[in-house]
Amino acid sequence: MSKKVSTVTWTIFLTVFIFHSVLENAIHVFRYFDEAVALLCLPLAAYDYLINKRAKGIKVTKTRKMQLGLLAAFLLCGLAGNFLYQFQPLWVVTFSTVLAAKFFMILLAAGYLQKFLQINLEEQGTIIEVLSIVWFGYYILSLCLPGILTVPEAWDICAKSSLLFALLVFCEHKRAWMYRVALLMMLAMLFLSGKEKAYGAVLVFGLFYYLIVHRKVQTKVRYILYMAIPIAILAWDKIYYYYVQGNGRFAKSIMTSTSIQIAKDYFPIGTGFGTFGSNYAKEIYSPVYYLYGIAENAELGAESKKYLTDVFWPILFGETGVLGTVIYCGLIILLFVQIQRVFFYNKKNYFLLIFMFVFMLMTTFTEAGFMQPMVMVFAFIMGIVLQEYEEKRKQKMKYFE
């Protein structure tokens, strides 16, 4: 594939991911874009293993084997709950299965695509600048014409602007003025979103950039835990309101306590995909909500369905039980281990990856975390950067052989 075709293909993918929420409202088919990319994982993985690996005698890396193995185990765990308890019809189970594993499927698919695209992310500065300016311009225009254009949600603004801001700092730039304008626009959008995690993202970004790029310090788990303290202080009003002052009456605390009860009652595999907290459990109102009295709640009932998908850990506990939650945590830990290896190859790549990883960890406590649509672009970028590292590592190993 020529460099020009690769760049155009990558730009189209990134543009659709950034404007996904806008496009899906205008053209219905775009609603399934990230699912389509996720499902690319299966044929690309088969091609990579059967053609590239076996024909050329190249071994599949242990990390890739573990990733695919844990992902398969997670899917089997959730599907076992569907098979045993049959709370939802087959079509709901099918769509929900893809949604539950979508982040890691896109991560893998992006890695396979990178083998064909061979994109050097650091050289894409101009594309990122243009996308940032267009993203900001669309947002301002949508505020002026709310009846005509779809105004992006605050959480969507926060996630996409955080990523573009990080990419702007990461990439090389030919026009300094354009870079500065785009950077200021993304910073403005983060603060305009009004989300506590937007302020947390700026804090995490500044600390990581100083420690990793300037001080050459590798991130440890304890550093991430230290950063959780100021972020918790920023979000304390909401934490106190939902979990303490509400005394178990508000949606988040109800969903959390109910999911723990489901994990106990349906130990160890939960009630299956599409039955609790996920998007299709909301659209096709799950019988599990009636079973646990959630349908009677004003915020979570069948008529309002207002905050049913505003969670992450309760989805894992409810739908896949203790076993599925442990397996999914294994996938997250394995991703962290992969990112840690990049530190010794390229500090800027490592900084970008660890920033995205910590940002997504933050969203697991406020929204649907790794399962929410707006972070699928994170999986796409991470997959490309990690695959780039793998290829450089293999080249280095060949050099020393």
Image (cartoon, rainbow, N blue to C red):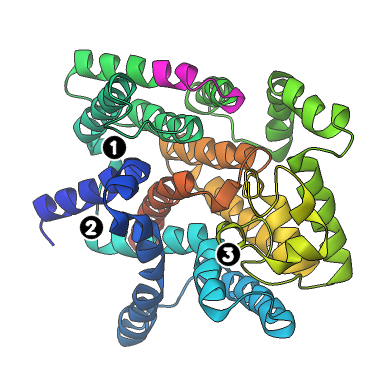
Kind of residue at disc 1: Glu
Mark 3: secondary structure: loop
Helix, strand or loop at label 2? It is helix
Say which amino acid is labelled 3.
Ile
Query: For the residues carrying marks 1 and 3, which lies nearer the camera in this image?
Result: 3
**361 left or right of 239?**
left
Asked whether residue 394 is in view, the answer is no
312 is higher (above) or lower (below) than 126: below
Q: In the figure, 347 relative to 61: above or below? A: above
**Crowd band around label 2 with a 10 angstrom C-alpha radius: few (<14), some (14–19), many (20+):** many
**Residue at label 1?**
122
Image coords of residue 355 (percent x, y): 52, 35
In-image side of 5 versus 188 (left or right): left
Q: Amino acid at mark 2?
A: Leu
Q: Quadrant of the image for the N terminus? A: bottom left
Tell me where residue 262 appears, x and y as whole percent. 83, 63
Residue count near mark 1 (Cα–Cα under 10 Å), binned few <14, some 14–19, many ≥20: some
Task: Indicate which label's residue lies in the foreground, 3 or 2.
Answer: 3
Span highlighted in magenta in the image: 187-197
What residue is disc 3 on?
Answer: 284
- Marked residue nearer the N-terminal end (3 or 2): 2
Sooner in the amino-acid sequence: mark 1 or mark 2: 2
The answer to whether 327 appears left or right of 155 in the picture is: right
Q: Which mark is residue 117?
A: 2
Disc 1 versus disc 3: distance between alpha carbons? 43 Å
Query: Callout 3 environment at 10 Å: few (<14), some (14 to 19), or many (20+)?
Result: some
Could you tell me which residue is drawn at 55 percent across and 53 percent down? 371
Q: Nearer the viewer, residue 36 or 46?
A: 36
Marks 1 and 3 in Cβ contact (< 8 Å)? no
Tell me the quarter of the picture where residue 261 sits: bottom right
Residue 7's tag is none
At x 30%, y 20%, the residue is 140
